[in-house]
Image: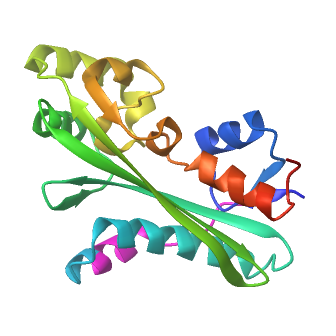
Amino acid sequence: MTLILASASQIRIRLLQAAGVPVMSIPARVDEDSIRRALQAEAAPPSDIADTLAEMKARKVAENRPDDLVLGCDQVLAFKGEVWAKPESPADALGQLHRLRGQTHILLSAAVLYHQARPIWRHIGEARLTMRPLSDAYLSDHVDRNWSSICHSLGGYKLEEEGVRLFSAIGGDYFTVLGLPLLPLLGYLGDRGSIPT
């Protein structure tokens, strides 16, 4: 079995490969921003936004690969009733970090598996992250040093890199923070016989 990831996410590909899951990337072409905005306009909860985006990615790729297992994933950051998008500029990233410092926010990582043109499994992992009360100067330096890496990361940080220094506490699964609820996914793939157990 080769799992098709409906994304070009290098971290998700590396996590799956490291776990011994044969994976192929076919990025889904969906308008995430429009979908997210429409769901937010309907006051959809953050978990529904993540789940819907993950499913739409899986469905889009599965339309052309119905016999394959197709995995769609999405992650949202929820903070004080808001769902955040990725920062659009260094100034935007710095603004996000200023709001998060000294506070706790939630990362929701959704995964949906499609087979035979229908969803067969879904999971939403949740992690709570508490940021240290860092200085303006440190946060500014963090963004300056890491912008090329964090420009596609929610909240303006990458936990697998220097961003780990921003946090005092993390509750939840590490893989969920990275954008893939890997342990539940591996459990399901093993139970269905798609990977050896």
**Does the magenta segment cover residue 54?**
no
**Range drawn in magenta:** 26-39
169 lies above or below 88: above
In this image, 161 relative to 64: left or right?
A: left
Residue at 86% x, 56% y is 2
Q: How far across and down, in percent of the image, does residue 130 sit? A: 22, 33
Q: How far across and down, in percent of the image, does residue 101 sit? A: 14, 31
**Does the magenta segment cover residue 28?**
yes
Say which of 49 and 98 sits in front. Answer: 49
Say which of 137 and 15 sits in front. Answer: 15
In this image, 57 relative to 145: left or right?
A: right
In this image, 47 relative to 30: left or right?
A: left
Query: What is the image's colouring?
Result: rainbow
Residue at 87% x, 61% y is 193
Residue at 69% x, 84% y is 118
Q: How far across and down, in percent of the image, does residue 83 sit? A: 25, 60
Image quarter hosting the N terminus: bottom right
* Residue 147 appearing in the image: yes
128 lies above or below 169: below
3 lies above or below 140: below
In this image, 46 relative to 13: left or right?
A: left
